[in-house]
Image: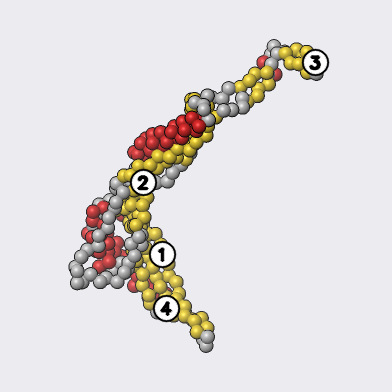
């Protein structure tokens, strides 16, 4: 959170003080001076918001493999072979840097069935390994997902579109937020038959990176008749910020 403050004045109480009608002479030494903070009055507090739409330049994909088998070892072993094949595809064929591929989730867990006669019993195991992939060629995301499915990926979750450097848009959204705050303060002052004075404080609310989620649910491949590839549209994302502004009211 960023805050800009106008220096607040203070009232110096020193020298001569009147107590109960008696004059008390203070020392000329200012080390014994008493300070009292000036109380702010006649102010307007508003929150201004600014937002712009930008094209995303990166996508975060969740791609993985899930395998079921009779034993935990069999499920994990079969799943490891499939995820290795997927890793090779991403790095060698699609030239995705190793730093842009990270394990997002890994587990091996039992599957249970329940009957009144036998109660709860383990019926096989499920292994799942998911990779979080950062990908920047947004026009080819659909082709990448199709290739991953062909290579054995059967878990593809939502896609996040974002901008890697939201700071490049910060000046624009701050200007829009400040303009919005000025408009609100002017409207309030006008309604009160007053005028807006100088800005006393400004506080910027911290905002996270601009991200847009697009759901992509892995389904059974049924495109044989159409032969079409998956189409993913990046669209636009929103970059925004808010400013809490205090104005003097004249």
* Mark 1 or mark 3: whose residue is earlier in sequence: 3
Q: Is residue 89 visible?
A: no
**Element under disc 1:** strand
| Label at residue 21 | 3
Q: Nearer the viewer, mark 4 or mark 3?
A: 3
Q: Are marks 1 and 3 in contact (CB under 8 Å)?
A: no
Mark before the other along the chain sequence, 1 or 4: 1
Tell me the element at label 4.
Answer: strand
Determine if residue 107 is in view: yes
At label 1, counting other C-alpha atoms closer than 10 Å, the crowd grade (few under 14, some 14-19, many 20 or more) is: some
Give the image quarter of residue 53.
Answer: top left
Q: Residue, x 50% and y 84% (percent of image)?
A: 115
Task: Give the answer, above or below, for where 114 lies relative to 247.
Answer: below
Q: Earlier in the sequence, mark 1 or mark 2?
A: 1
Numbered disc 2: secondary structure = strand
Q: Which residue is mark 1?
A: 106
| Residue at the (47%, 80%) spot, across then down | 113
Q: Is residue 89 left or right of residue 178?
A: left
- Residue 124, label in figure: 4
Of badges 1 and 2, the one in the foreground is 2
Q: Secondary structure at mark 3?
A: loop
């Amino acid at each position: 959170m960023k805050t800009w403050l106008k220096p607040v004045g203070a009232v110096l109480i020193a020298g001569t003080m009147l107590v109960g009608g008696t004059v008390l002479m203070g020392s000329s030494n200012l080390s014994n001076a008493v300070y009292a903070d000036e109380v702010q009055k006649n102010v307007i507090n508003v929150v201004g918001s600014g937002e712009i739409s930008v094209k995303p330049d990166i996508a975060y994909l969740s791609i993985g493999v899930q395998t079921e088998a009779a034993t935990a070892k069999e499920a994990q072993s079969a799943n490891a072979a499939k995820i290795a094949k997927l890793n090779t595809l991403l790095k060698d064929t699609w030239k995705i840097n190793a730093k842009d591929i990270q394990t997002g989730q890994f587990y091996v867990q039992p599957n249970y069935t329940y009957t009144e006669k036998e109660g709860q019993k383990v019926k096989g195991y499920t292994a799942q390994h998911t990779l979080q992939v950062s990908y920047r060629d947004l026009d080819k995301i659909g082709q990448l997902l199709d290739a991953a499915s062909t290579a054995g990926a059967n878990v593809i979750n939502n896609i996040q579109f974002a901008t890697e450097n939201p700071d490049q848009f910060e000046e624009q959204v701050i200007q829009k937020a400040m303009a919005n705050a000025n408009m609100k303060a002017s409207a309030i002052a006008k309604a009160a038959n007053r005028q807006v004075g100088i800005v006393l404080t400004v506080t910027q609310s911290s905002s996270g990176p601009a991200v847009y989620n697009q759901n992509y649910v892995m389904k059974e491949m049924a495109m044989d008749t159409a032969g079409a590839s998956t189409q993913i549209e990046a669209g636009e994302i929103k970059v925004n910020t808010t400013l809490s502004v205090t104005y003097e009211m004249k």
